[in-house]
């Protein structure tokens, strides 16, 4: 595919990467991805965002099919991550008259990416910038998902260029959301994996753009959103807004269980924690995607983890949940551990050690039951849950 005009004198000049199956080492991309770049053929021609280094030469040829590269006046860098700036060094060599427009943070990052000084301007939040017959507006959006990020809005075309915002790792040469196959699941998957840790920042940026007349969203990856762009903005807002009863403490109980014994403990713990002013949610860690409980974890007041000991360790689903917590604001949240064991019983201690490393507060010693929990063990579990909940209530009233 060559180029595509997405609005009057605004052309998609990005690259398709249909065979990509792993992005940034850890993100699975079942339908590949795109590196979207845009050329505005205004009085002062401008490029918005760049592409991956792998596609640099092909990218330049696309641009040359539309314009003499020496005529490029500006290159807007919304975000400096290498999938957007990999080809920038080569592009700058071919566009000697171009200046870079970015946030101050992005300009500092670029110096360490390109290892050279570049002509440019650090734009202010809310600043308007004239291209002659088109007007740009810049909206700073730090931590979408890097601290350098901004959005660019083209006023005449009511087009928002949010870089990684509202993006999707989804490759389809038809490009527009109303032409491609259903990618709803991929939008949510992208949000949870990449944007999820920054929900507070999502809401702050959405507040900044809520008054804009947005008719098209042109992100850096995936389909261009023209059918109902506010559908995606509102989805991000909903996904970023914690849903909980503000008058009750939220407690999460995660467990993994091979033969149902730790599950019995978890149910008793949850029941005990529910007897006072709390909202308790019980999760089988093996049956839930860690990314989809990220928001719950961030909202929780306390978290309990239960695992049997297997081969001297806790079960992997619990570790998967805890690994997600590295990218969530959970410092000083209260937690505790419990579980069954046969002869060694290291799981609860190992979980506790990891949680301490994450700066969580352990409020009570681990609770363990030998093999199959007895009725007396389950009573202890109920008391364990109650005491944990009580520690949250007491803390909030002191």
Image: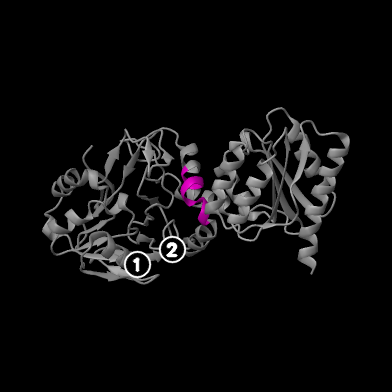
Work out whether residue 281 or residue 133 is closer to the camera in this orientation and state it.
281
Residue 192 lies in the magenta-colored region: yes
Q: Residues within 10 Å of mark 2 (few under 14, many from 20)?
A: many
Residue 32 lies in the magenta-colored region: no
In the picture, which quadrant includes the C terminus?
Answer: bottom right
Work out whether residue 128 or residue 339 is closer to the camera in this orientation and state it.
339
Residue 166 can be seen in this image: yes
In the picture, which quadrant includes the N terminus?
Answer: top left
Tell me which corner region of the image, top left, top right, bottom left or bottom right, holds residue 128: bottom left
Q: Identify the mark at residue 103; answer none if there is no mark.
A: 1
List x then y, in percent, for residue 175: 33, 39
List x then y, in percent, for residue 75: 24, 60
List x then y, in percent, for residue 111: 26, 65
**Residues shaded magenta:** 190-198
Work out whether residue 60 or residue 396 is closer to the camera in this orientation and state it.
396
> Pointers 1 and 2 in contact (CB under 8 A)?
yes
SS for callout 2? loop
Which residue: 72% across, 53% down? 250
Which residue: 42% across, 44% down? 227
Q: Is residue 158 left or right of residue 241?
A: left
Q: Is residue 250 left or right of residue 190?
A: right
> Of all residues shown, which one is farthest toward the front?
343
Which residue: 11% across, 54% down? 68
* Render colour scheme: one colour
Q: Residues within 10 Å of mark 1 (few under 14, many from 20)?
A: many
Q: Identify the mark at residue 142; answer none if there is no mark.
A: 2
Q: Of marks 1 and 2, which one's residue comes earlier in the chain?
A: 1
Q: Is residue 16 left or right of residue 365?
A: left
């Amino acid at each position: 595919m060559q180029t595509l005009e997405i609005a009057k004198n605004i052309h998609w000049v990005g690259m398709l990467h249909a065979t990509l199956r792993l992005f940034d080492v850890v993100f699975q991309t079942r339908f590949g991805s795109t590196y979207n770049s845009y050329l505005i053929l205004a009085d002062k021609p401008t490029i918005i965002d760049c592409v991956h280094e792998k596609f640099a030469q092909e990218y330049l040829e696309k641009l040359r099919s539309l314009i003499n590269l020496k005529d490029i006046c500006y290159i807007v860098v919304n975000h400096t991550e290498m999938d957007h700036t990999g080809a920038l060094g080569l592009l700058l060599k071919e566009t000697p008259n171009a200046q870079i427009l970015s946030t101050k943070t992005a300009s500092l990052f670029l110096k360490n990416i390109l290892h050279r000084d570049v002509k440019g301007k650090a734009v202010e939040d809310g600043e308007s910038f004239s291209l002659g017959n088109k007007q740009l507006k810049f909206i700073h959006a730090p931590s979408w998902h890097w601290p350098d990020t901004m959005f660019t809005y083209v006023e005449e075309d009511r087009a928002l260029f949010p870089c990684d915002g509202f993006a999707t790792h989804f490759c389809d040469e038809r490009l527009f959301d109303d032409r491609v196959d259903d990618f709803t699941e991929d939008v949510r998957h992208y949000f949870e994996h990449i944007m999820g840790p920054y929900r507070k920042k999502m809401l702050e940026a959405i507040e900044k753009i809520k008054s804009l007349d947005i008719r098209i969203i042109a992100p850096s990856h995936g389909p261009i959103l023209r059918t109902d762009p506010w559908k995606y903005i509102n989805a991000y807002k909903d996904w970023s807004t914690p849903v909980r009863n503000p008058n009750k403490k939220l407690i999460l109980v995660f467990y993994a269980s091979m033969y149902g014994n730790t599950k019995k403990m978890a149910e008793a713990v949850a029941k005990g924690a529910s007897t006072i002013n709390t909202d308790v949610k019980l999760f089988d860690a093996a049956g839930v995607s860690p990314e989809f409980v990220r928001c719950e974890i961030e909202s929780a007041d306390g978290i309990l983890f239960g695992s049997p000991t297997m081969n001297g360790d806790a079960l992997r689903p619990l570790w998967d949940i805890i690994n997600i917590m590295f990218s969530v604001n959970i410092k000083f949240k209260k937690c505790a551990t419990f579980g069954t064991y046969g002869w060694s019983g290291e799981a609860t201690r190992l979980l506790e050690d990891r949680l301490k490393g994450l700066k969580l507060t352990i409020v009570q010693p681990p609770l363990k039951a030998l093999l199959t929990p007895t009725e007396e063990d389950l009573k202890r579990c109920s008391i364990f849950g109650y005491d944990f909940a009580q520690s949250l209530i007491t803390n909030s009233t002191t």
